[in-house]
Amino acid sequence: MSTGTRPGRLDASDGNTVNKPHLQPHLPLRNPDLYRYPPAPPKQPRGTNPPAALPPCPFCPSPMATPAAAPAPPNPNPVPDDPPPPPPQQEEEAPEQEQETSSPPPLAPTTSIERTPSGGEETESDDSSSVSSAASSAPAPAAAGGAAGRPFPAAKDLLHISFNQDYGCFAAGTKSGFRIYNCDPFREIFRRDLAAEGDGSGGGGIGVVEMLFRCNILALVGGGDNPHYPPNKVMIWDDHQSRCIGELSFRSPVRGVRLRRDRIIVVLENKIFVYNFADLKLVHQIETAPNPKGLCAVSQQPGSIVLVCPGAQKGQVRVEHYGARKTKFINAHTSRVACFALSQDGRLIATASTKGTLVRIYNAVEGNLLQEVRRGADRAEIYSLAFSNNLQYLAVSSDKGTIHVFNLKINVGSTANDKPMPAPESEIPHISPPLSFIKGVLPKYFHSEWSVAQFRLHEGEQYIVAFGHEKNTVAVVGMDGSFYRCQFDPVNGGEMLQLECYNFLKPSDQQ
């Protein structure tokens, strides 16, 4: 343990320490004035231009009651994964069953723990080279790197990409620091070259960058071959002061970080820790299945905190409703969960398994299956899922290189009594009356719900997706340094129209 670090509580289950924040004594996070972000002049290194800072974001953290920890119940009827025969394949129906138990914790009201199995799953087989700020100008469009052109050169310097909470910006972690970009219009807001501005503590590699909307507070985790910070620490960065104002330390590498205005969520390999943003006090600790990708999602609606993470069982997702003090377990798939997304209001969850052919949408409150859509017929690794703001569409990206947009047929005004939506008759193949007796035994593959719009990119590249602020637009960011903005036709569907294409990592920035 480094000098000046206060020892935390040792957890014997995996050896992690839950440390109190290591704060500079003259900048405590307990001070609520910190969250009003006074425009303090940033500390600039010698021989560089003054860096541009994010605009202030005035808000105050709101209190939240401490939830009661709830162990995940074992799966009484595990369904083994079937071998993947070629399509068409027979899918099993998803029976709706619930089992509710209650366990009173010693210091909190009773936590309701419910388990909702979704039944069997079909055998899926599928589908700027300057160190100073560049906010005044956007990079030139990359004509040759568009969807119809050749791929961008490999972005060897890029370690991480992620959208902010409202999808208006995205962050990139590199081997030399991090950068923040605006999506519409596309432009680089600022960059920090930590290797050049370093204090001698190491390289500049940043493996995780988590924004807090558009304010000056970010969460950073070191990464790459030469990390700027230890990979087992979460650093709270204040860009107005161009330095870290606090940290959280653990005994294993940090896999992911999620931020709310009142919470910090830190994801480790087998645990998730939830902290108060006002004082960095630990309020909840969750045991999960092995989670090397750092999967976690949290709602952003004020006054309603919903957190989704992998459950303790294979194919299970765990939903924490902190306002209602309720924990929900959803057996979403028979194979491991590869990706999931939570709507901004915390009402809908989209999940995909490691097979990558089907995406399922669940009611986050009751845990029942609302809709199932098909990405394709071949196995694929799902990289990203995203709901539109109006909850009418779902975007999906995978290693197949195609962005899919699905139409959601869900009544978002209902929560407690949502039922699965039947497929429209137009999506069911026509069967003549003499053969109508076999309609009930046809595999679901023949009347699956397919995407209404597609945008084809380069197979094998990792892309993340989000819906833009303009109507029917989708933003795509790739680990190859590409940014796309495209538009889909909700009536006619088909191929999306490419509106913009940029290489946000210029060739001079790549090694």
Image (cartoon, rainbow, N blue to C red):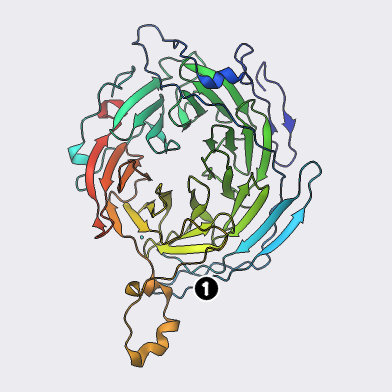
* Residue found 60% across the figure and 51% down from its top: 319
Q: Is residue 146 left or right of residue 87?
A: left
Residue sitting at the far right: 106
* Residue found 25% across the figure and 43% down from its top: 151
* Residue found 33% across the figure and 19% down from its top: 133
SS type, badge 1: loop
Q: Is residue 466 above or below residue 448?
A: above
The image shows residue 320 at horizontal and vertical percentages of: 62, 48
Q: Which residue is mark 1?
A: 93
Q: Is residue 48 above or below residue 410?
A: above
- Is residue 87 visible to the viewer in this orientation of the structure? no
Q: Quadrant of residue 25?
A: top right
The image shows residue 239 at horizontal and vertical percentages of: 46, 19
Quarter of the image with the N terminus in it: top right
Q: Is residue 433 above or below residue 302?
A: below
The image shows residue 305 at horizontal and vertical percentages of: 58, 42
* Residue found 72% across the figure and 44% down from its top: 68
Kind of residue at badge 1: Glu
Residue sitting at the far front: 413
- Is residue 287 visible to the viewer in this orientation of the structure? yes
Q: Is residue 448 above or below residue 354?
A: below
| Tally of marks | 1
Quarter of the image with the C terminus in it: top left
Residue sitting at the far top: 46
Q: Is residue 116 left or right of residue 209?
A: right
The residue nearer to you, when weighing 294 against 164, is 164
The image shows residue 275 at horizontal and vertical percentages of: 63, 33
Residue sitting at the far left: 143
